[in-house]
Structures are given as structure tokens and as C-alpha cells.
Amino acid sequence: MPRCVGFKPNGDPCERIVPASQGYCYSHDPERAEERRRAASRAGKSKPSRDVADVKRRLSELADGVLNGSVDKSVGAVASQILNVYLRAVSVELKVREQQEIEQRLEELEALLAQKKEATNWG
């Protein structure tokens, strides 16, 4: 089975299997470089782990403020609701990104399956 002719960042050859009609996998295909750059740019703008850590910190501070009396309970309740909605949005964003990655991998597998069927028809 043909493998991608690209190289990993550490210099090792890529091990992904590609259709015979292609020489590169998605990650190394020069024709998809702009698409990868845009995807990386979108991913770089959203740092879910940093967002989650920030919200956790803010919720902790908010809880402390409510408990020590420096934050009104009603203000704390509304602020925590807003922060929870924000966490939900981050969660949805992660799920969308995972879905896109799964779709990409599925496309690669479908291409490989098509190649295998083609080889079987000739063999």
C-alpha cells in the first residue's frame, strides 16, 4: 500500500496510507496547505483549555466573593450562569472540531477503501 511521501516535523517519513492517485496525505499535501493554515488559525484563536481554566478561576473567585460577602448573591448567581453558558459554548466548539477531524479521517479511509477495491478488481 502506498504511503505518504511527506515527512513528520521530526524528519521521519509519514506513515499514512494514501490512494495510489495521491502522493500525500491531508497533512502533507501542498495543494491543501492554505486549507490547513486556515484551520490552524481558527484552532489557534480558540484555546479551550485556557478558556476553561480561566472560567474555573473566575467561578472560584466568584464563589469566594459570595461566601465572604463581597459579592451580592444575586450578582454571583447571574455571573455563574453566564460563565456556565460560556463553558457550554466552548464544549460545543470542541465537539465541532472533533467532528471535523473525524470527517477528515473518514475521507482518508474511504479513499483507501476505494483504492483497495480498485486493486482487487485488477488483481
Image: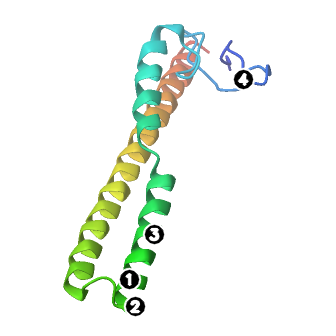
Q: Which quadrant would the N terminus be assigned to in this image?
A: top right
- Mark 4 and mark 2 lie on one chain; the one further toward the N terminus is 4
Amino acid type, residue under disc 3 in the picture: Lys
Rendered residue at 47%/35% (across/down): 44
The residue at which mark 3 appears reads as 56
Mark 3 vs mark 2, CA separation in Å: 18 Å
User: In front of the other: label 1 or label 4?
Assistant: 1
Q: Which quadrant would the C terminus be assigned to in this image?
A: top right
The residue at which mark 2 appears reads as 68
Residue 58 placement (x, y as % from top left): 41, 69
- Mark 3 and mark 4 lie on one chain; the one further toward the N terminus is 4
Amino acid type, residue under disc 4 in the picture: Pro
Circles 1 and 4 in contact, beta carbons < 8 Å? no
The one nearer the camera, 36 or 71, is 71
Of the numbered discs in the image, which one, if any, rests on residue 65?
Answer: 1
Rendered residue at 38%/52% (across/down): 95
User: In front of the other: label 4 or label 2?
Assistant: 2
Of the numbered discs in the image, which one, if any, rests on residue 77?
Answer: none
The one nearer the camera, 104 or 118, is 104
Colour approach in the figure: rainbow
- Mark 1 and mark 4 lie on one chain; the one further toward the N terminus is 4
- Mark 3 and mark 2 lie on one chain; the one further toward the N terminus is 3
In the displayed structure, does residue 26 sit left or right of residue 45?
right
The residue at which mark 4 appears reads as 9
Question: What crowding class fits label 4: few (fewer than 14 Cα within 10 Å), some (14-19), or many (20 or more)?
Answer: few
Mark 1 vs mark 2, CA separation in Å: 5 Å
